[in-house]
């Protein structure tokens, strides 16, 4: 069974809990406690594979709260970064969060392929009050080589289910890549060791 760890990041009130609860329960619940960190668990089957999904929904992060961010950035295998399409400040905050994910990951996992991230523009039902155009969201996602989806946690389940499914697939590929890489560098250093021990002896025969 694979363990997959995701973290949801974004501004206060962007709808992180609403998006996650929609995915986990198919329901929209209007209000959520926002002063605690929550860890959700779910067993899933994707492409015939059984998965243990853990999702970390931290209490809100302001753009200045780098220390709160670093914990989930180290822990998670993939990220959902949520902004509210009717709140430009939340979009700017999402931009900062994407940069911080990139920087923290670059420091910790040198040379690894990009960690899977999905940028989500929530509250699509509030398009009459839109402050962030869809192409701006798409452009930011392209710059950061991540997936992008506009959704409405209030109105629809399917888009949210699709984005989580795609993200989980990318996380599984990423974890496999990391495991293969570790195995490869392990066997390379073993080959080096064998060469060091026996290579010299062979030369002197
Ligand atoms: N119209 C609309 N409102 C939404 C949507 N998603 C969430 N909301 C509302 O936005 C508010 C904030 O939603 P939350 O899910 O608590 O947001 P959050 O990002 O988890 O907020 P914090 O826990 O404070 O960080 C709540 O009043 C939700 O009912 C949506 O798609 N459309």
Image (tube, helix red, strand yellow):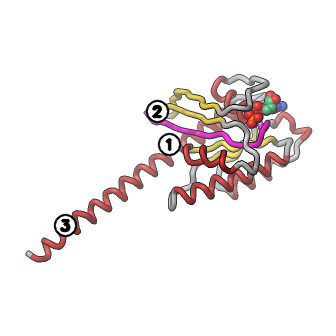
- Spatial CA span between label 3 and label 2: 42 Å
Can you say whether 45 is above or below 182 in the image? above
Mark 1 surroundings within 10 Å by alpha-carbon count, few (fewer than 14), some (14 through 19), many (20 or more): some
Question: Which corner quadrant of the image does residue 84 belong to?
Answer: top right
Which residue lies under the disc numbered 1? Answer: 172
Q: Does the residue labelled 3 lie within 8 Å of ligand 1?
A: no
Image depth: mark 3 or mark 2 in front: 3
Q: Residue 197 carries which label?
A: 3
Question: Which corner quadrant of the image does residue 126 belong to?
Answer: top right
Q: What element carries label 2?
A: strand
Quarter of the rendered image showing ligand 1 = top right
Q: Where is residue 38 in the image (x, y as percent from the top left)?
A: 64, 31
Decide whether residue 24 is among the magenta residues.
no
Residue in the image at 13% along x and 71% along y: 201
Image depth: mark 3 or mark 1 in front: 3
Can you say whether 201 is above or below 167 in the image? below
């Amino acid at each position: 069974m694979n363990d997959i760890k995701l973290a949801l990041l974004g501004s206060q009130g962007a709808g992180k809990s609403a998006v996650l609860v929609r995915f986990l329960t198919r329901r929209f619940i209007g209000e959520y406690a926002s002063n605690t960190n929550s860890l959700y668990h779910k067993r899933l089957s994707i492409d015939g594979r059984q998965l243990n999904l853990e999702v970390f929904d931290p209490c809100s992060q302001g753009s200045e709260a780098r220390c709160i961010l670093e914990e989930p950035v180290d822990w998670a295998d993939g990220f959902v970064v949520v902004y509210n399409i009717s709140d430009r400040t939340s979009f700017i905050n999402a931009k900062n969060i994407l940069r911080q994910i990139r920087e923290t990951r670059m420091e910790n996992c040198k040379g690894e392929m990009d960690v899977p991230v999905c940028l989500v523009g929530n509250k699509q039902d509030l398009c009459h009050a839109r402050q962030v155009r869809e192409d701006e969201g798409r452009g930011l996602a392209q710059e950061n080589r991540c997936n992008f989806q506009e959704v409405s946690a209030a109105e629809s389940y399917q888009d949210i289910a699709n984005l989580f499914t795609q993200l989980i697939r990318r996380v599984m590929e990423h974890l496999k890549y990391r495991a293969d890489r570790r195995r490869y560098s392990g066997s390379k250093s073993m080959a080096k060791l064998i060469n060091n021990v026996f290579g010299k002896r062979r030369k002197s025969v």
